[in-house]
Image (cartoon, rainbow, N blue to C red):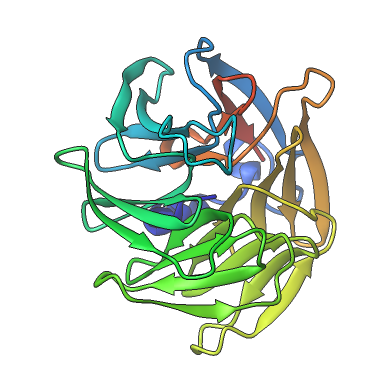
Amino acid sequence: MNNSFLFAAAAALALSGCAGSQNGGTDETPVTPELTQVWKTDTVFTGSESTLYDPSADVIYVSNGNTKAGEKDNDGFISVVNTDGTVRDLRWAEGNLHAPKGMALIGGKLYVTDIDEVKIIDVASASIEKTIAVDSAVFLNDVATDGQQVYFSDSRTGRIYALATDGSYETISTTNTGVNGLECHAGHLYALDGEGLKKFSSDGNYTQETINTQVTGGDGLVILNDSTFVASRWHGEIFFIRGSETTVLLDTQAEKSNTADIGFVPGKNLVIVPTFLKNEVAAYELAY
């Protein structure tokens, strides 16, 4: 589920070079990527599923209420967390939220999937201003934006949708089994599904190309540049993809700590990890 507003930040990362320049090496010999835990919250959340960084406010949104991820039980809420791990507002937005998952920001609005609907939350008032019911939706999951429109996935039907800011939507792809994580970068939509990491054409036809087959069944996706990605699997794995190489950055399966829809704070190189059933959010500094 996603961080599509980070175009400028991602570009800045690309210009600053791979971690060779960050870690004293050279661009020709990049260091082995690694994650170092910086902070972890207390167990104050409930089914923390997705995290999203808001650069305009320098805060992190967390979607909660996914212990019963497919039930309309009205126990969902959105939290606001500071980038140092302190909780600013545990229940920033609640009411008429059931199992909110992926999130994306555009035009002062937070778009959130909620089972078979997309909720549009006005950030200034922290209130739901519009609910969009999606025909034939079963399990809506991640959300991303290219700054013009919003994309969202349905993991059960394999569909990806495009949503205009006027509330109209269309199906743009139907052949993505188990699709979850979405992200946009440089005019292209990317998706994680049962086959791996896919890149879609930018010509409006959304022709897909599988660019990585190692990370199948992925959940969250961060794009650092055209060939460098961080992807998570819900069960407790985070991967670093650079070109044709895939590296395991984190494995918390033994601790039964999930790694759901990760977020990213570019100025601090922080990967933000919602631990789902552990009811925490953790931050790891990425070196690469």
Side of 200 relative to 146 (left or right): right
Name the spot of residue 24 as percent of width and height, x first. Answer: 64, 35
Residue 21: % across, % down: 59, 42
Q: Does the image show residue 87?
A: yes
39 or 129: which is nearer to us? 129
Residue at the (33%, 32%) spot, across then down = 59
Question: Residue 238 vs residue 86: left or right?
Answer: right
The mark tally for this picture is: 0
Front-most of 127 and 37?
A: 127
The correct choice, above or below, for 234 with respect to 107 in the image is above
Q: Residue at x 81, y 26 (%)?
A: 253
Q: From this viewpoint, is residue 227 visible?
A: no
In this rendering, the answer to whether 188 lies above or below 192 is below
Quadrant in which residue 259 is drawn: top right
Q: Which residue occupies 62% across, 49% down?
A: 18
List x then y, in percent, for residue 282: 56, 22
